[in-house]
């Protein structure tokens, strides 16, 4: 069984009879996995997990997700069906696992229910990808997210991304480009496709940064992210130009 199948099986085993569905989304269903792509899944449950379930799911994901041994980083979100159907904003998620949180999890933190504006994007991606691993097609579980909420969720992440430019450069630059694309077109595209769209609209002086981030994403794994001194100095001006373009669209 491949990594995706093992993660889906883990989620189904932990949720048991409360499982509504497990859905693959992100790059895996929208353009194909790139070397630096995460494996993105959304699981839907009938009720919130108890403490024992949370720990079982977390322990399983710590073993199934990573950067070595042929593994990809896994991002798994669990949501209770009644908290997103009918839709309201901001939605609440029941559990979130991502590799960027591994250190916190290994120190004892266990994911808890919390507001997750990003669920607007995830539900949109799940509906667009239409890739159930367990359960019915996503259109039988979710209603489409209103465009206004998709924009709100996208824009809410901009300040955090600007703060991550030095520590997670490639991802921050590409995610900003995807937000710009989403706010402008209403579509949630793969990161490299969003970069292609943004490169045609970005001022010439900022294009080398976004082009390099896109090429890293397409051709290299996480550990191979490199930035020359000249490009590194141009990252913040590029990101600020994209953020300003997003702000203009929102305020128009």
Image (tube, rainbow, N blue to C red):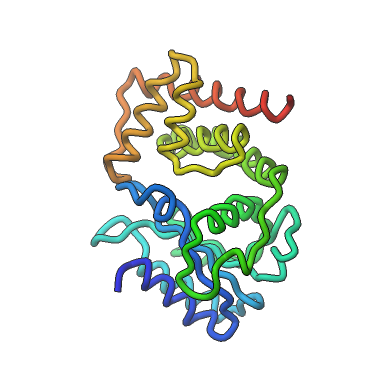
Q: Residue at x 69, y 63 (%)?
A: 84
**Is residue 159 positioned above or below 130 on the image?**
above
Q: Residue at x 51, y 26 (%)?
A: 239
In depth, the one of 93 and 101 nearer the eye is 93
One can see residue 104 in this view: no
- Quadrant position of the C terminus in the picture: top right
Task: Examine the image and state in which quarter residue 137 appears.
Answer: bottom right
In depth, the one of 211 and 159 nearer the eye is 211
Residue 198: give x, y in percent of width and height.
Answer: 49, 27
**Is residue 224 positioned above or below 97 on the image?**
above
* 119 relative to 130 in the view: left or right: right
Q: Residue at x 62, y 69 (%)?
A: 140
One can see residue 70 in this view: yes
Residue located farthest toward the left when viewing the structure as drawn: 69
Task: Examine the image and state in which quarter residue 46 appears.
Answer: bottom right
**Is residue 195 positioned above or below 204 on the image?**
below
Q: How many badges with numbers are in the image?
A: 0
* 116 relative to 56 in the view: left or right: right
Q: Residue at x 50, y 65 (%)?
A: 23
Residue 71: give x, y in percent of width and height.
Answer: 30, 61
* 86 relative to 214 in the view: left or right: right
Residue 188: give x, y in percent of width and height.
Answer: 54, 44
């Amino acid at each position: 069984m491949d990594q995706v199948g093992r993660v889906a099986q883990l989620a189904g085993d932990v949720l048991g009879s409360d499982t509504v569905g497990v859905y693959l989304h992100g790059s895996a269903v929208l353009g194909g996995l790139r070397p630096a792509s995460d494996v993105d899944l959304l699981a839907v449950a009938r009720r919130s997990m108890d403490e024992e379930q949370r720990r079982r799911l977390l322990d399983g994901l710590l073993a199934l997700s990573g950067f070595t041994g042929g593994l990809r980083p896994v991002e798994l979100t669990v949501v209770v069906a009644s908290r997103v159907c009918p839709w309201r904003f901001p939605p609440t998620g029941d559990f979130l696992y991502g590799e960027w949180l591994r250190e916190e999890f290994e120190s004892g933190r266990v994911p808890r229910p919390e507001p997750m504006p990003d669920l607007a994007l995830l539900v949109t991606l799940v509906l667009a990808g239409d890739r159930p691993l367990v359960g019915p097609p996503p259109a039988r579980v979710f209603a489409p997210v209103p465009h206004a909420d998709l924009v709100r969720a996208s824009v809410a992440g901009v300040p955090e991304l600007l703060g991550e430019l030095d520590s997670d450069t490639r991802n921050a630059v590409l995610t900003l480009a995807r937000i710009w694309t989403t706010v402008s077109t209403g579509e949630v595209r793969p990161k490299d496709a969003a970069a292609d769209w943004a490169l045609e609209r970005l001022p010439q002086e900022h294009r080398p940064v976004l082009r390099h981030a896109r090429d890293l994403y397409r051709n290299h794994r996480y550990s191979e992210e490199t930035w020359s001194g000249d490009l590194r100095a141009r990252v913040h001006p590029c990101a600020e130009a994209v953020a300003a373009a997003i702000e203009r669209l929102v305020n128009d």
